[in-house]
């Protein structure tokens, strides 16, 4: 293990031993996550809810985890929430598919991470390929089936959030909780809309 990885591992163990968050704070952050999901749900109004919404949420979520893993700096995940949103708006302005821009950003981060911090980066790369990959494939399906599958992938990502929250690794607990609220609400809503259509 090189010196940089040793230092990062020590910092991660130190952060794991931090005190627990108060219950009221956990509830507040989860509610903010749900509210963010509501905002995304209506972001395409008056158009119908489409597969691009859960795909975009998954793309940005997985980029957050990947960027934090690559840099070894937890707050970078929050920065990527903003930068990912800018990437998506830029893609829309340039008429480039959102998934392509998110995938390109993920590829750059993955390459840097494999060089810089391979042991911490590898699980995040696999997670991005799995969760985001399913949502991208869902874009090619029938709209109703695609929405349901992308919604399920987004809801399943809440499990990834829960693991990171519990272990207190890679991203800050606040981001993991916020993401959990957003993923569950928006993902299950997408599944419900697809089934009701």
Image: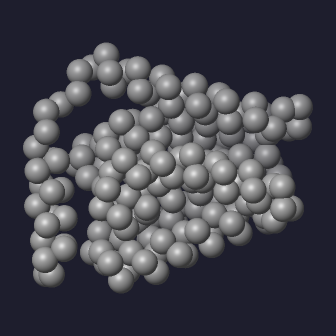
Would you place residue 144 above or below residue 137 in this image?
above
Q: Farthest residue in the top direction?
A: 24
Let me know if residue 196 appears in the view: yes
| Position of residue 147 measured from the top left corner of the image (x, y, whole percent) | 73, 49
Tell whether 176 sits left or right of 140: left
Specify the quadrant that holds the C terminus. Answer: top right
Whether residue 123 is visible = no
Residue 130 at x, y percent in the picture: 52, 66
Q: Residue at x 54, y 69 (%)?
A: 106
Left or right: where 103 falls relative to 143 = left
Is 47 situated above or below 97? Answer: above
Q: Tell me residue 3's x, y (percent).
A: 13, 77
Residue 10 x, y percent position in the rendering: 11, 61
Residue at the image position 32 percent from the left and 44 percent from the top: 172
Report the coloring of the rendering.
Answer: one colour
Q: Quadrant of residue 17?
A: top left
Q: Nearer the viewer, residue 54 or 192?
A: 54
Task: Please indicate whether residue 142 sits to the left or right of residue 154 in the image.
Answer: right
In the rendered image, the vertical position of residue 62 relative to residue 22, given as above or below: below
Question: Residue 165's image quarter?
Answer: top left
Image quarter (top left, top right, bottom left or bottom right) of the N terminus: bottom left
Residue at the spot 50% in from the left edge and 65% down from the top edge = 128
Image label count: 0
Residue shown at 15% from the left, 81% from the top:
2
Residue furthest right as drawn: 46
Residue 85 lies left or right of residue 65; in this view the side is right
> Quarter of the image holding residue 5?
bottom left
């Amino acid at each position: 293990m090189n010196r940089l990885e040793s230092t990062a591992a020590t910092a991660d163990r130190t952060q794991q031993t931090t005190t627990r968050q108060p219950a009221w704070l956990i509830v507040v952050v989860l509610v903010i996550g749900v509210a963010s999901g509501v905002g995304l749900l209506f972001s395409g109004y008056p158009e119908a809810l489409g597969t691009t919404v859960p795909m975009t949420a998954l793309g940005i979520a997985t980029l957050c985890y990947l960027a934090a893993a690559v840099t070894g700096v937890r707050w970078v995940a929050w920065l990527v929430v903003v930068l990912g949103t800018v990437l998506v708006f830029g893609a829309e302005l340039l008429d480039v598919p959102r998934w392509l821009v998110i995938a390109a950003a993920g590829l750059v981060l993955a390459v840097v991470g494999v060089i810089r911090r391979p042991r911490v980066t590898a699980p995040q790369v696999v997670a991005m390929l799995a969760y985001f990959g399913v949502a991208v494939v869902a874009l090619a399906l029938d709209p109703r089936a695609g929405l349901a599958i992308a919604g399920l992938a987004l809801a399943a990502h809440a499990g990834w959030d829960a693991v990171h929250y519990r272990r207190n690794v890679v991203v800050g607990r606040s981001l993991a909780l916020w993401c959990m609220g957003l993923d569950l609400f928006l993902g299950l809503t997408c599944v419900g809309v697809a089934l009701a259509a």
